[in-house]
Image: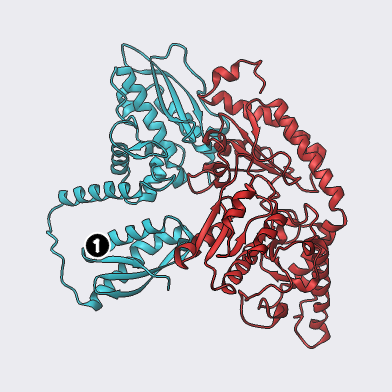
Amino acid sequence: MKVIYLDNNATSQVAPEALEAMMPFLSNRYGNPSSMHYFGGSAARDVALARESLADLLGVTPTEIIFTSGGTESDSTAILSALATAPDRKEIVTTRVEHPAVLNLCKHLARFKGYTVKWLSVDKEGMLDIEEVKEAISERTALVSIMWANNETGVIFPIEQIAEIAAEKGALMHTDGVQIVGKVPLDLKKTAINFLALSGHKLHSAKGIGALYLKKGTRFQPFMIGGHQEYDRRAGTENVPGIVGLGKAAQLAAQNIEQERSRVKALRDRLQNGILSSVKFAKVNGSIDNRLPNTLNIGFEFVEGESILLKLDELGICASSGSACTSGSLEPSHVLRAMGVPFTMVHGSIRFSLSRYNTEEEIDYVVSQMPLIIGSLRAMSPFGQDRLNSACVVQ
Amino acid sequence: MWEYTEKVKDHFFNPRNVGSLEDADAIGEVGSLACGDALKLFLKIDPETKRILDARFQTFGCGSAVASSSALTEMIKGKTVDEALAITNQDIADYLGGLPKQKMHCSVMGKDALEAAIACYKGEPAPKDHLDGELVCECFGVTDKHIREIALQNRLTTIEEVTNFTKAGGGCGLCHDKIERILDEIRDELKQKQTTVSSAPREMTNIQKIARIQEVIEKEIRPTLQKDGGDMELIDLEGAKVKIAFRGICLSCPSAPLTKAGIEAKLKELVHPDLVVEEVSA
């Protein structure tokens, strides 16, 4: 069965070009870049080129890039470094809608390490109140850690502006950029952001590789301690295939970022409008205008998300849900709950996240199937039969 | 991804007996939109033989909720109401070739709806109505009576199991203490029933105590934690104070304080009633 992959915020297809670039380093070019001999040492040049490509994508200089094992390591490195280098400040400002890589680390720091964490709320659009952000950041703040774009809703926060506020108070600024990098053009050099975490497999390279942007001049303490790799900032033999693949993926993203952004956005809007016009009692979660171009989070009343996913899966369509039933816990999406989305809508929420590899044909197929799927589940549902049966109701 | 059996998938993708009965003799309703699942069961019952002639359902919920509802209707058709009442939630799960443990509450929902429908038929108030008894879990509206009954029937001993079967405690987690107390009561009652050996705590040396604590941790506690990606370690024993450190996912788990309480209860029960557990970040 052909797979229609609309779960790119979870992970994405490795670009064929990135795979091709990696292959020599997974086979005959297995040398260690730290070696003296040419066989190994020549890989250092490939690592350097990859670093340049990634730096170009972010608008920074190559020495500001540290390769890591992924988004989580980058987040942990940044957060723990920021706290270690500001021992007199004991407060962290973050949000209620962070990815677990940041959310659970902040909870841990509050519970065991005596930090005070200020959890910022979001409104029903999933947006922050900038006045609240200003109030929360003070001379006691060691670190502001706020994601750039939300993984569930795609909502984008004004990180450049928040970084300015943090800098004014002498606090360091970290942002989890895992979802935004490669989807929206960035020019980090012009911002006051100190740290940005990114993950390779979210932008069409392999799993197990990521990077941390570390602004020049930012106080830093390494997370992994050992050898002298990554200019003494991250010990451990380089993941050469991963780094080369990430470099290639970054280059591909940078080349076409504007065209892809508008093409993917057009597909996403086609999906969104197609579903909204054919399925009643459906509503987009999160700000319509302030969103990643690839993400659509949509809630369906009177049905449950896992049931929708199972029906989609039967057709080879991959998506995900904020429903409690899809996770081990009974607690539905913390992001949608923080936005005040009613429980009834959270349970029936589905996230579609697109990539450059999706086609109009795929989107049209999904649009054609959604009314059937939702219709069959609603026909089974004890709720809203009366409302649903009055066919003239259009939201 | 849940590991659903072929039977669960079959009953989800091809549900039997979906819909309502215009002239139903009994209707049972459980759950709500806010809870994430709900089931409305319709029965047509022969007034002479008390046999269930037809059964239909409407379900809002996940794959296993739909499958459990569908299975239930198939199981009860042709049975008398009293035969039907003998069906347990485990029977529903077994009919489907088993359910993932976190999904057992779907089978309980089926049983609850059946009991509600038959009570309605008999003109009795719904017996296992979740509003009967004292409200324990406010997130999912579950009472102490319900938890007690399901826990006894299914031999549940941990909060996690209670959550899997009743959803109680699966939301904010504030009721975990209350659930623990209900489980303690059940444990005490069961113990009293088998009052053969009176259990004055044996006096032990420190070395014996540590060895026994370590044994309980290895056999009773760590396997459960490890199933969820967590772990713990015994750091030290100071008098009656057992110092432990969490490892793995327990470190970032908001329910860790409850896990700690659970460990303490286990050690009190199996080693010495005076023991208290203290978490250290070693």
- Residue B80 makes an appearance in the image: no
Q: How many marks?
A: 1
Occupied quadrant, residue A237 = bottom right
Q: Amino acid at mark 1?
A: Lys
Image spot of residue A343 (x, y percent): 52, 36
The residue sitting at 58% across, 30% down in the picture is: A301
Instruction: Please tell me whether residue A237 is drawn above or below residue B189 in the rendered image.
Output: below
Q: Residue A246 at x, y = what percent? A: 77, 64
x, y (%) of residue B102?
Answer: 45, 46
Q: What subunit carries mark 1?
A: B
Q: How is the image coloured?
A: by chain
Query: From the viewer's perspective, is A364 left or right of B57?
Result: right
Which residue is rendered at x = 81% and y = 74% of the image? A48
Question: To which residue does mark 1 refer?
Answer: B268
Quadrant location of the N terminus of chain A in the rendered image: top right
Q: State the hue of chain B.
A: cyan
SS at circle 1? helix
Q: Residue visible at 72% across and 26% down? A: A277
Pick the front one: B247 or A31: B247
Q: Does residue A65 appear in this view?
A: yes
Q: Chain letter for red, please.
A: A
Q: Is residue A316 left or right of residue B263?
A: right
How packed mark 1 is, by other alpha carbons closer than 10 Å (few <14, some 14-19, many 20 or more), is some
Along the viewing direction, whichever of B206 and B84 lies nearer the viewer:
B206
Quadrant placement of the C terminus of chain A: top right
Residue sticking out furthest to the bottom: A36
Residue A108 against residue B86 in the figure, above or below: below
| Residue A20 image position (x, y, % from top left) | 83, 63
